[in-house]
Every structure is written in structure tokens, then in C-alpha cells.
Amino acid sequence: MVKRGKITMNDVAQLAGVSTMTVSNVINDRVKVSPDARERVLAAIRESGYQINAAARSLRSGRSGVIGLAVPQVSNAYFGMFAELVIAEARRHGYHVAIEQTGAVAVGEAAAVAQSRRLQLDGLILSLATADAQSALLPMTDQGIPIVALGEPDPAGRFDHVTVPNEAGTAAATEHLVDQGCRRIAVVTGGNLDRLTMFTRRYNGYRTALEDRGIRPDPKLRFAVDTLSREGARSTGHRIADSGLGVDGVVVFNDMVAMGVIRGLKDRGVNVPDDMRVIGFDDVAESAFFIPSLSTVSPDHRWKAAKAVDLILSRIDDPLAPPREYTAPFTIVRRESTA
Amino acid sequence: MVKRGKITMNDVAQLAGVSTMTVSNVINDRVKVSPDARERVLAAIRESGYQINAAARSLRSGRSGVIGLAVPQVSNAYFGMFAELVIAEARRHGYHVAIEQTGAVAVGEAAAVAQSRRLQLDGLILSLATADAQSALLPMTDQGIPIVALGEPDPAGRFDHVTVPNEAGTAAATEHLVDQGCRRIAVVTGGNLDRLTMFTRRYNGYRTALEDRGIRPDPKLRFAVDTLSREGARSTGHRIADSGLGVDGVVVFNDMVAMGVIRGLKDRGVNVPDDMRVIGFDDVAESAFFIPSLSTVSPDHRWKAAKAVDLILSRIDDPLAPPREYTAPFTIVRRESTA
DNA sequence: TTGTAAGCGTTATCAA
DNA sequence: TTGATAACGCTTACAA
């Protein structure tokens, strides 16, 4: 008995011989419904192929059952992996995930927040990539929905924040290179280091570690790179190989770029790890399969995804709690690229 | 003048001293609105920080302005790249994209369709990975929204279908290996080859090409692999290296697996391309950066994304047109792995 | 060009 | 335990 066109809750109610409220109560498992009525309703739903209308539900209830996840770029391996973990974690709690793309620009990040309100999302996990996100996010007042910031913190400190061990992780990576015998250790970071961004933090970790080990940091050994482009990473490899600075190790601020750098070194006949050692940050899946497999700082991504979802849910319950800050645990994974 | 809580179209209307319909007309750029009224409305929107409620709009109008994209796995490089292209293409037409994950299982694919109806999506681009999708998709009748199938076709032939040149592409890849001097060419495919799936088609392209070049296909040279796991690809590399079959070339059904295979060969001391040549399929971004860079069949992904979005939009206008079928153009990209 | 009225499908509230 | 009613915020249809 398949009705043509849209089947509403009303249709199901008529089929089952009950009121729409009873159907609603069965679907949402809300109040007590007699086993008899419940059975008839479930049968009617099955027969009719009824699907609840999310727009109507969300309009009336004000909640959508959907959490937003805004990332700079969905094609980036790191964010793809992270999205998958968030989806799994949200599902465990009965939530759906809507993925947005910010393009790693401030307006994109602000747009994601606006879009979340439009779509009545129940929360937003917002991966902040810009430092000047400040300009776009700061003026936002009515922060309606729970927001968890990843990467950079909200400059206004309004959001919960989950981050990775930028300083400590990079320091440990740098020390690992020292332990492997490197003395002329270059560092590859993004952007400028004027503000306190992820790049600055990782750069600081590198410097601190060198100083701790009695090696004087050489400013010439810092190479800046365009963050999201693989070509940029590759040409940075060329620059390092051509620098004539006697580099014997490279700390790179993330795995994607590290692999690009290694590729660029290879273009110049510089082999990793024989001629130069390289370590990354993130431990994306492909790092284990790259040739050479990539040593890296491995934050606990699952922990991070779980914490982000947890924070959203707990803030739905308690919107007024003060903003919280968490840092994921990490390990150093030693692979071929630093052997 | 920022109102606390939800600002509705009505609030904006009052602020601007017009009716809600005038506000609606301004927002949707629908009928003629006097420049004066329009200006006041836009000012009121700016002042109040009004955001339209997507749920209400979609409930009333029956349209959401959102196209769904359901892929097996968002962390997969191929689907990540494709999602990005679809997002860009949809945006050009004023549409938003909601990404779903099917897990490459039939129930996931069917769930994505159901979810699309619930969410009032205006269309669904559905990347079909399962052959037994037949069992889950076939019984679906009320196909409410426009659906475009990618990868495998809808077994019932109800959906528009955009595909890649499975046979021709793999045949060209195989011929390229022959041209490079390979004679014992292995093939890596997924699953069993009982049904006519993407795997079968690519396998057929391989066989046809060999026969065309007067090389007799050897069934022992076919290696099956678990599609979505990188570990599986790597161990396939081990199996090929350990096989003692004198393999000098490998045609792999996609790039991700090809890179895993090369990694596995490397584990056994088999170097690509010196000891063995390898070619993939897809031309994902990282293939150019892998070491060795990967030769591959490169379908025009942008073309494919554009065609998929076009088909959705044209079907919104004309739901009853007969299903259409398109195949993306391709080129063979020669890189180090087959040099 | 602008405004009024009705209703999209669901759920909160309250009465039965 | 169940049902009637109103309302969520917007757009369609039509009247002014």
C-alpha cells in the first residue's frame, strides 16, 4: 500500500487508526504508548514507507539532530580522516554530521557559523585555520549554537577549544632528530610568525628543543611554505636541497607538506633518510605507506574527535558553562624517514 | 540593535516598516520591490543580524537548496577530491552540498537515499560501490528526488549515471605497460568477478588489451585485494613480490591501492620502476607526489563533477526524462612508476 | 508594488 | 494513555 507523493505523519496516523500525536510519540519514544497502539503505528510506518520530515521537525522543535563540522578543505587527508572519526563519534550519540568547507579563509569560517544557524544545527565543530579569523569571527555576537574550535582558538575566547600539542609535539620531534645525530636541522612552517598561531607554536617547540640540546637555532634554517598546496611543499624541498646550508634534518609542521618536501628533495637527488632525515606532524594514514614511511608526531585523533563531540553535547545541556580548553595526548612515531 | 535570541522575518519586517512578504521578496529577489523598500529591508537585515530559517523555508517551499553527495568514505583521497569539485560546481549554481558516508555497504547506500528524503534535499549524487546494492536499492520505489549514480549504475536503471572509462582506461594502461616492454603483467582488482562490476570491467580492459597485443592472459597473474584497506594493498605487494611468477608490470584498479602495492614491493626490496612497473587508475592528487610518482589513468574529474551536478539540476526541471548515461574522457599520465 | 491569509508537517501543551 | 489545538517561520496564492 504505497501512497504516491509525500506521506505525512497524518497519513500514518489514519492508517494506524490513531492520532498524529501517538505516531509522534512512538517515533520519538517519548511518553508511554500502549503496546497495541505502538505495534499498529510501527506497522503503518513500515507499510507506507513513511519518512519523517526533518524540516518540519526541526522548525517545530528547534533542534535538528545534526552537528556541523567545518574544515578548511575536505580533500585534505588530515581533515578527511578527522571527519570520519567525528562522524563515527557523533553517530554513537545519535547525531548526524554535516560537513562544511571554509577554504581556510576568514570569511569562509564566518560563513560556516552563519550557515549553522540557518540550518538549525545543534552544534558546530569549527576547524580554525586563519589567524585573521579574528577579524571575521570577533564581531559575531549571538553565538546561538554551541561551537567547539579546533586548531586556532577563538580569539575572543568564547568557544571551547580542543587542540594538539603544538609546542611539545614539535619539540619532541626535534629532539628525536637530534638523537638521530642531526645537527643542522631545518624547520618548515607556514605563514608569518608575527602572531601566536599554530605555526608560531610549532616553531617555538623546535627552537626550544634545539636550545635545550645546546644547538643554536639558525634563522636561515627556517623555510616558509604555502600551507595547502602540494606544489609549494615540493618546491620547498628544492629550496632546501639547493640551499647549500648543510641541512641534515628537517622538522615539518605537517605530514602532507613533509611528504611534498621529501618528494622535492628526491627531485634533487637527495635521499631520505640517507642524506637527510625528515619528520612530520599529524600521522595521517598515508604517512605509513609513503616511501620512505614518514616519522611523525602522532596526536590521538580519535581522542580529539571524541572530545569535540562530547563538548558539543555537554554544552547543549549547559550553554553557560565557562569555555574549556583541552590538548590531545601524542606519541612520536619512528619510521623510515628518520632511521 | 541586536535582539536576543531568534530573529524572524517578522522582526525584520517591523524594523523596516514593511510586511513579511516584502522582506521575503527582497531576500529571494522575486517580484518587483521598490528601491526604497528594498533598501530599508536590507538595512534592517544588516542591523538585526537576521539569518533566514532554512527549516521553515524548506518546509513551506519543499526545496532546500542543498544537494546530497553520498560517498563510501570521506577519508579516501579520491572521494575527498571529488567532493571538493562537486562543492565548487554546486556553488556556481547557488546550491549547497551535504556530504554523506555510505561505508561502501548496501545498507549505507540505501540509508543515504532515505536520509536525502528526510532532509528534503533537492537531489542526490550517489557514489555506488556495492554490486549487491541491488538488494538494497532495488525495492525502493518512490524515488522522490533526482538521483545521479556514480561508479556502479543503479541495477534497476532508474537513475542517471556518470561513469569513468573502466574498460578503455584500463586497456590503455595495460597497453602502456606493454609499450614499455612489460610481458608478464599482473593485475590487481577487488572482489570477485562474477557480476559485471567496476572490477570486472577493468579486468576485462586488461585482458582485452593483452590479447590485442598478442599476449596470453595468465589467470595466476590476477591478484584480488580488499578495496578500502591500505594494509591489504601493501600485503598484495608482498604477495606479488613473493609469487615467483616473474612479474614485470602491474595494472592496479586504483591509485590508492597502487601506492600500497608499491609500498609492499619496496618492503620486499623490489624497486619501481627498475624491477617492476606499476600503473594505477584515478590520478588522485598525491599520485604526482608519491615516490616514485605514479603513472595512472586520469579521468576528467572536473568534467564528471560538473556533469553530475548538471544532471541533478536538469532533472529538477524535468523529472520524467529518461535516464541518461555518460562516460568521462580520460588520458594516460606517464610518470616515474612506468618509466 | 504591497499586504493578508492560509498552510507546509511536526511537536508542546493541555484537556479528556 | 490518547487526542485536539496551536504554533514554529516561512512562502504560495490572491486581494488590495
Image (tube, coloured by chain):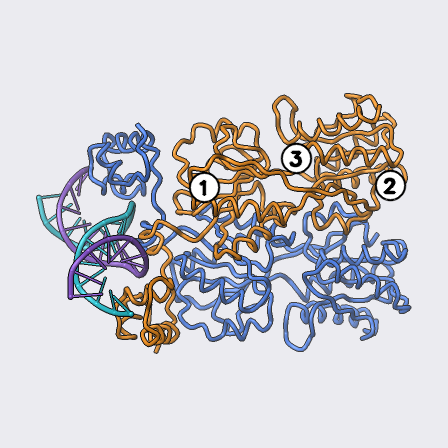
Chain colours: A orange, B blue, C purple, D cyan
Residue A146 badge: 1
Q: Is residue A140 above or below residue B171?
A: above
> SS of the residue at dot 3?
loop
- Work out whether mark 2 precedes mark 3 in sequence or the reverse, and give the earlier one: 3
Picture coordinates of residue A88, whole percent (x, y): 57, 55
Visible residue check, residue A6:
no
Residue A227 badge: 3
Picture coordinates of residue A76, whole percent (x, y): 63, 45
Visible residue check, residue A119:
yes
**Quadrant showing the N terminus of chain A:** bottom left
Asked if marks 2 and 3 touch (Cβ < 8 Å), the reply is no
Q: Residues within 10 Å of mark 1 (few under 14, many from 20)?
A: many
Instruction: Please give left or right for residue A218 compared with residue A305 in the image.
Output: right
Instruction: Please give left or right for residue B241 compared with residue B124 in the image.
Output: right
Q: In this view, does A88 lie above or below A70?
A: below
Instruction: Please give left or right for residue A142 compared with residue D9 in the image.
Output: right
* Residue under pointer 2: A273
**Mark 2 and mark 1: Cα distance apart in space:** 45 Å
Q: Is residue A282 above or below residue B179?
A: above
